[in-house]
Amino acid sequence: MSPKEYHCGDEDVVAKNKFDPSSTMWNKQSRIIIVVTVALIVLSSYMQKTSFYKKMTSDDKVASNTSTVTPLNEEVEVTSASEPRGFRKFWRSVKHRFQRKRKDSSRQQRVLSDIVKSRVEKLSKKEMNILLRTKENAMDIQQASMLVPWGGPGSKQAWWSDDLIAAYLIIMKFPESLRTKYPFTPCKHKDCSTDFGLRHTLEYRQKYKPWMITPGIIEESRPGQLYYRGISYSGSSIVWFHPGIHKTEKPVVMTRLLMNTLESAVKFSLDSTNGKVGKYFVFLDCDGFRLGSLPPLSDVKKTFRFMQDHMPDRLEKIYLFNLSTAAQLFLNMVTSVLSKEVKEKIIPVPNNSEKRYELLRTVMENKYIPTKFGGVDDFEFDADSYFQAPTATDEEGEEYLRTMPYHA
């Protein structure tokens, strides 16, 4: 069919030949047109954004060279005639959110990483020399120490480190002779070498396993009397203890709950400070406290020995809230087994809600302060979600009574 005949032919034939998608020529031409169109749209959009960005940065440079100083928190509005109004508004909102997020993030990073220093970073040359000598005497236990990290097997926070040795030597007051009375109970009547405390705690970690979670401590903790939550400005964890809301039935289980909480608190502090701090605050609320709420005094003293022997230089402060007569009497009874350094860290707080809140704000941000004490944290303790699941049986949790007679 000639072109002329084709043009003057039947209309249905013309329509079919012009617009049939199955036509090879139509498909090729259409694809080329679509690809070229999309490419032009993308290129045009890119050039527009690039020119806007150059215009915006050049305007910022000009503004920064003028005699008027723009406050850091004040937005500089670009008034280019070619700038889309919608995009300008969107850009300002995104920039504001980014700056605010970056400011909050950098502040927290400065507090928990840049400002705080590890124990080793604070040592003098003389103290560092004593540390290295102690470390050399304890080299035979280093490999075994790697198997008991903070939080238990699988944790990345190694227990053995120069900072750990420094924590022990701080309590020992860096004796040049490498002889000490610490740990206080086993070394009370004889001088021990400075590496003995490390060996003593290694045995405790191998046999007691403070990271162990048993069904018994999950049940014991259900009232929510003891847990850690939050971080202080100094990088130490926050431990909340409310002994008045629950009467201890099994002292062995309560001791394990306490040591597990402190173990987890130290690990959380180390995680939050790149391994630098590893300490905790304890806020002890004595509201409703009765002498019958706690286990026998002998068990309480034993628990304090656990803390003094195996958690040296981990306690920041113990703040006592709502201190009743019964609580004061109990405190007088247990302080006989505490060292002078620990006694100085126990601080009663006046029964005044405003002063108490002011004290809490000097330690931590408002978001970590429970609503009960004037903050905004409405956290409700749930034992199952807090512990997840047991990692050992109750029988395994009490094996230390047989394998560690001193601690039993």
Image (cartoon, helix red, strand yellow):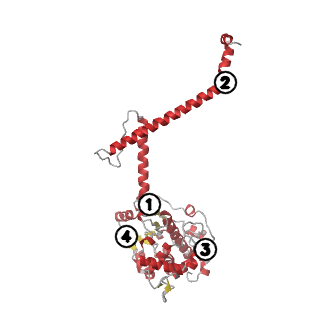
Q: Earlier in the sequence, mark 3 or mark 2?
A: 2
Q: Compared with residue 376, is residue 81 higher up or lower down, i.e. above or below?
A: above
Amino acid at the residue labelled 1: Tyr
Q: Earlier in the sequence, mark 3 or mark 1?
A: 1
- Identify the mark at residue 349; answer none if there is no mark: 4
Q: Are marks 3 and 2 in contact (CB under 8 Å)?
A: no
Residue 89 visible in the current orientation: no
* Mark 1 surroundings: few (<14), some (14-19) or many (≥20) residues within 10 A: many
Q: Mark 1 — residue? A: 368
Residue for point 56% across, 32% down: 38
Report the Cα–Cα distance between label 3 and label 1. Answer: 32 Å
Which image quarter: residue 109?
bottom left
Q: Compared with residue 280, is residue 51 higher up or lower down, i.e. above or below?
A: above
Q: Is residue 72 left or right of residue 271?
A: left
Which image quarter: residue 405?
bottom right
Quadrant of the drawing holding the C terminus: bottom right
Q: Earlier in the sequence, mark 1 or mark 2?
A: 2
SS at mark 1 in the image: helix
- Identify the mark at residue 397; answer none if there is no mark: 3
Which-is-in-front pick, marks 1 and 4? 1
Image position, residue 299 (x, y; %)? 52, 79
* Mark 4 surroundings: few (<14), some (14-19) or many (≥20) residues within 10 A: some
